Amino acid sequence: MKTFRLIDLKIVRQDETSKRLEEFPLIDGLIINKEDGENHWMAEGLVSKEYRYFFEYLLQEGKEVKAYVTITKKSNRPAQLLAKVKNITVLGEHVSVLLDGKMVSSKLRKDSDKILEGLMKEGYSGDRLLEAFKQNI
């Protein structure tokens, strides 16, 4: 396993009417590449206690979230992580949030974009587009 410094954490927050990318300012953080051949990573971020209830909701629901993590230095491009909250620890005015998930490679994202563009050019839309995309992925 390899451990790196977690510099930035953003999570896609989605409700019935909207989807937005929210940044969770880190007091400190680390991210571990499990090196298991499956691209699994664990990230721990120390954030303000004000975010506790959001992360508790994710933990209770067992919801997988799309997170964007910046590793080692601010100038690095964020990596996409599909993760679930595994643990929350209250530490005074802060909370430690442990995320466990799988890193989505940029090649997969690029391939997905090409597949989607191709299907749209073929005239797929709505539910048909979704089904065709799932089959191609």
Image: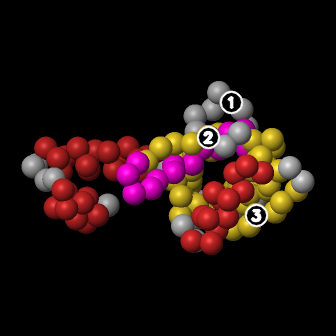
Q: Tell whether 9 sits left or right of 122.
A: right
Helix, strand or loop at disc 1? loop
Callout 2 environment at 10 Å: few (<14), some (14 to 19), or many (20+)?
A: some
Q: Which of the image's four quarters has the C terminus?
A: bottom left
The chief SS type of the magenta part is strand
Q: Position of residue 86 (x, y in %)?
A: 69, 68
Looking at the picture, does residue 102 appear above or below residue 113?
below
Q: Nearer the viewer, residue 45 or 39?
A: 45
Helix, strand or loop at disc 3? strand
Would you identify the image quadrant in which residue 22 lies? top right
Which residue is located at x 53 percent, y 58 percent? 65
Q: Which mark is residue 74?
A: 1
Q: What is the C-alpha distance between the residues marked 1 and 3?
A: 25 Å
Q: Is residue 93 visible?
A: yes
Q: What is the C-alpha distance between the residues marked 1 and 2?
A: 14 Å
Q: Which residue is mark 3?
A: 88
Q: Position of residue 38 (x, y in %)?
A: 57, 65
Looking at the picture, does residue 78 appear above or below residue 13?
above
Residue 17 in magenta stretch: yes
- Give the mark nearer the N terminus: 1 vs 2: 2
Q: Tell whether 122 sits left or right of 29.
A: left
Q: Which residue is mark 2?
A: 23
* Furthest residue toward right: 92
Assess whether mark 2 and mark 1 are in contact (beta carbons under 8 angstroms): no
* Furthest residue toward top: 75
Which mark is nearer the camera, 1 or 3?
3
Which residue is located at x 78 percent, y 51 percent? 49
Callout 3 environment at 10 Å: few (<14), some (14 to 19), or many (20+)?
A: some
Q: Which residues are magenta?
A: 2-18
The amino acid sitting under disc 2 is Glu
